[in-house]
Amino acid sequence: MNISSVTASIAALFRQREDTAEAGFPEYPGTMRDPQGNAQRYGEYLHLLLERRRTLAADLRPHKVGHKPESRLRTLNMRLYDDPHYLVYLHAAGAGIAELEAEAARCMASLDEDSRYVREHGGEEWRGVHALAGHDRVAFGFAAIALLLVADGGLVKTFHRLVSPQYDSRNQLLDVLVKAFDPAQPVGATYAWHGASRPWTEPLLRALALPAQERPAALAAYMEKWTRLMRPHGWKPDLDTAAGKDPLFSDFAFEVALAVCGWDIDDSAFAGHPYYPRELVRHYRSTLRHGRDAWRAAGAGAGVAIHAPPLPVRSSLAASGRTGLARWIELASDGDQQATDAALAMIEGADPVDLHELVEALEEARLGIAADLKDDDSVAAQIHMLGEARALDDFTEPDGPPAGIDRCMALLCTWNDWLAERAYRLVPIDLGDDAWHAVVVRRECLEELRNLSGSLGIPLARPAELYHLE
């Protein structure tokens, strides 16, 4: 089946879907996959995306009066964002396998055509546009739903055209996972360091690099930590998805599903995890593995050597030769040399230190607290991220207040005391702006950090001053 016939074969399905949307998107009673989902919110969001899809399609009509090439490019770029999100939300809302397959096939055809047009007609500004960026969680969701459900092997073998080859957008994990299903997917020799995706991509790459008999246990250990790893991406144990409350968390461990299917890994130890997309895995194994993908040998995966990133190198802080700002960042990173180097690479080395450039580099390298005064979700996510990086036990958040500045204050106050019991100290950075900034250092390094801060002109505050502790 070619791309045009795929699109034509599901046209009736989407006409029906869009007709139904006039009266409100239908819910999927009893089948919602999102463990904390809200059917009404999903219905509203999916309906909104369908309405926007219809509007964008109208904007792209060739006969539309006054339609400028720049407008077409912007419209197509919006569709490149919307379509993968729509598919991931459709999965979380509980749509059936057949509907997900049809929508995935439609999206693949549309995304390929749209991104190619944008690259060819958009000039230098648009030259690198692709549908899927490797550090975006949605890209993994779209890849899993499409590669594990779409029956047309010819269409699947065009998937590599959707994945960005741009150095800053590439992700080794996405590349090797896609290559297990589409052999034309290129795998790079080197990849850019990316702090945001590092906590959840690197452990999985290390698991896939293990001997086959060790992979099930490694994936099971990864799944045990999965929700904690997803804190920065919107998951929390008390998510409130009622109208006007928390955003929906529609993500699942799609990367694990792709690894399990691509490398034929036993998933029995974690198949019951609420965020493991077992329906996709079950369908793939029963329907596609020995048909569409019979070409791939058992356990072969991507068929290339996986150069697993090493565990973070934590040098002895007492034996370090770094000085000045490099030493300051090394203390804030708890000796993580890769993170220290990544943060330093983002700072131009101005003297005196550009404080805003410094806190941006710390945020990008995931080395500190950086959040708006009212953004308690980001503060909580960063607290758990910093604890995970230091292999600390899970932090129990205070019961109240519910939200906003008071919630941020309560989180930071409680965490400050919690860290003190574990030989660490919370060190606020006081820029006098409307945001929280802080780093975490070992107790024995606190005085050195304070002295360096004085010489570098980095304004610190004591937690008791900034968080109004008694």
Image (spheres, rainbow, N blue to C red):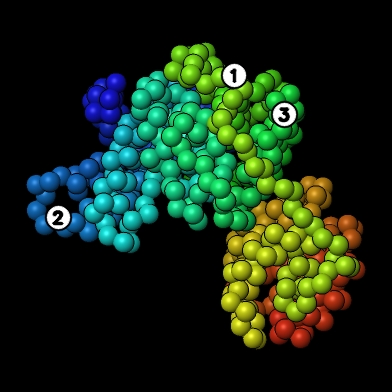
Q: Residue shown at 69%/78% (left/top)?
A: 430
List x then y, in percent, for residue 185. Answer: 46, 37
- The crowd level at tag 1 (other Cα within 10 Å; few <14, some 14-19, many 20+) is few
Q: Nearer the viewer, residue 407 or 77?
A: 77
Tell me the residue that label 1 is attached to: 298
List x then y, in percent, for residue 301. Answer: 57, 28
Taking 346 as reference, is 176 above or below it? above
List x then y, in percent, for residue 242. Answer: 53, 43
Q: Is residue 214 visible?
A: yes
Task: Quote the CA–CA distance across marks 3 and 1.
Answer: 14 Å
Left or right relative to 168: residue 450 = right
Q: Nearer the viewer, residue 48 or 12?
A: 12
Tell me the residue that label 2 is attached to: 67
Find residue 459 and report its image quarter.
bottom right
Which of discs 2 and 1 lies nearer the camera? The answer is 1
Left or right relative to 416: residue 186 = left
Q: Residue shown at 69%/39% (left/top)?
A: 206
Q: Quadrant of the N terminus?
A: top left
Q: Which element type, helix, strand or loop, lies under badge 2?
A: loop
The residue under label 2 is which amino acid type? His
Task: Quote the CA–CA distance across marks 2 and 1.
Answer: 52 Å
Q: Are marks 2 and 3 in contact (CB under 8 Å)?
A: no
Which of discs 2 and 3 lies nearer the camera? The answer is 3
| Badge 2 or badge 3: first in the primary sequence | 2
Determine which of the numbered discs, if any, sits on residue 211 in the image.
3
| Badge 2 or badge 1: first in the primary sequence | 2
List x then y, in percent, for residue 63. Answer: 9, 47
The residue under label 3 is which amino acid type? Pro
Q: Nearer the viewer, residue 144 or 209?
A: 209
Determine which of the numbered discs, if any, sits on residue 186 in the image.
none
